Image: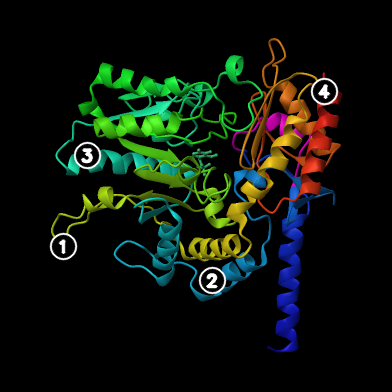
Amino acid sequence: MSADDTSTSRALADHYARQATEAPASLDAFWMPFTANKQFKAAPRLLASASGMHYRDVDGNEILDATAGLWCCNAGHARPRIVEAVKKQIETLDFAPNFQMSSPLPFKLAERLAAITPGDLNRVFYTNSGSESVDTALKIALAYHRTRGEGQRTRLIGREKGYHGVGFGGISVGGLPNNRKWFGSLLPGTDHLRHTLDLQRNAFSKGLPPHGIELAEDLERMVALHDASTIAAVIIEPISGSAGVVIPPEGYLQRIREICDRHGILLIFDEVITGFGRLGHAFGAQRFGVVPDLITAAKGITNGCVPMGAVFVSDRVHDAFMHGADNAIDLFHGYTYSGHPLACAAALATLDTYEEENLFDKALSLGGYWQEALHSLKGLPNVIDIRNDGLVGAIELAARPGAPGTRAYDVFTRAFHQGHLLIRVTGDVIALSPPLIVEKPHIDRIVQILADALRATA
Ligand SMILES: Cc1ncc(COP(=O)(O)O)c(C=O)c1O
């Protein structure tokens, strides 16, 4: 490389570094997702860089990350192996199609993923997000029954308070009114189990709440109403995150599995947030000792750094599609970016990082400390529940009369601007999910800043 070339590439690198870290001149054109745009743009929070447990904002403040980005950077930020793998990959192969063509990495990654999934969930279908994973899993469930001659099994069962992303399938089986009511009649033929959040009986439970296993019997009620022969699948999050961190009652998921088995209904676990170590195992399925037929995943699969999702499918479900002629396409579904080489490279290096640092054990070794630290906030103003499992936590606040969500939002902005702590709020629930590299001093700081913000918020 000549001296001229070197100085040109340095100038380019400087240009892109500045572009990434300097505040933008205008915030107008970007219509931000799931955001009160007017409110945000009046007092923006802009993150410019990240490393390990911290972000740095455009003003240079170091921000402690108590949410792993958005439940996705489970190994912390800018991890060296992942950075290296992505850099190398983009230089080597920027894109390769996966329709009737492919490249080495999607296969290598699928083998690695199949090795950590529970039971016989050995087949991997790639997507680009949690929402796409959910819609993919629902479609696989419908097509599975049809290919076996049970095409009348079309009903999809979700749950109140469920969050399964924002595709039409996901919002139809989802149970959050705001995500549904704006968007017309949704998919026909869905129904919803009752949710399991029960503050009256279970408030301040440590780990799994003791009451509520009987709510699984709701599925029997649906079978009685619709007949099992019309039901394709049940989709639930082992622990829901975005819907306010709802931890399953003891025995609930096992009971759901039994009822699905009894009636030939496929069980889909939406593990977009519980996957990849959040609960002290690769997946929530292993944490709860329940093997579903399909698992939807995303987020932590690439440590959040390149968009990617996946559906893990049991051999039994997969094999049902393989009875056609050799030249027949077995599933009419897929995305241009299914198995994108950059995402696969990121995912492989992410798995290396999880393994090398035993990060899936972290929620077990630190879970007790995390639990006690969170529950020390009991008794602070407006705190009506604290919930936890693995390295997930939630603090629910009493809603202000006539202004739901505003109290938790004020805690969020106070924690960010004054405490330099990133948390997440959904309604009046503060949701916490730190990167799995979190250590005790970080936990102490998270709890201290939260306590200050809670005390200061009327
Ligand atoms: C359980 C669950 N499913 C699906 C999704 C949607 O994922 P994405 O935002 O990547 O589409 C989320 C996102 O938080 C989730 O928590």
In the rendered structure, find residue 326 and report the number of the disc placed on it.
Answer: 1
Residue type at mark 4?
Thr
Residue 205 magenta-highlighted: no
343 sits to left or right of 446: left
Q: Which residue is pictured at 38% across the width and 30% down the height?
A: 256
Q: Which residues are magenta?
A: 33-46
Instruction: Quote the CA–CA distance across marks 3 and 4.
Output: 52 Å
**Does dot 2 land on a helix, a strand or a loop?**
helix
Q: Which residue is mark 3?
A: 145
Query: Closer to the camera: disc 1 or disc 2?
Result: 1
Residue 40 magenta-highlighted: yes
Residue type at mark 3?
His
Residue type at mark 2?
Gln
Q: Residues within 10 Å of mark 3 (few under 14, many from 20)?
A: many
437 sits to left or right of 317: right
In the rendered structure, find residue 457 and report the number of the disc placed on it.
Answer: 4
Q: Which residue is mark 2?
A: 89
* Farthest residue, direction bottom: 2
341 sits to left or right of 329: right
Instruction: Quote the CA–CA distance across marks 1 and 2.
Output: 32 Å
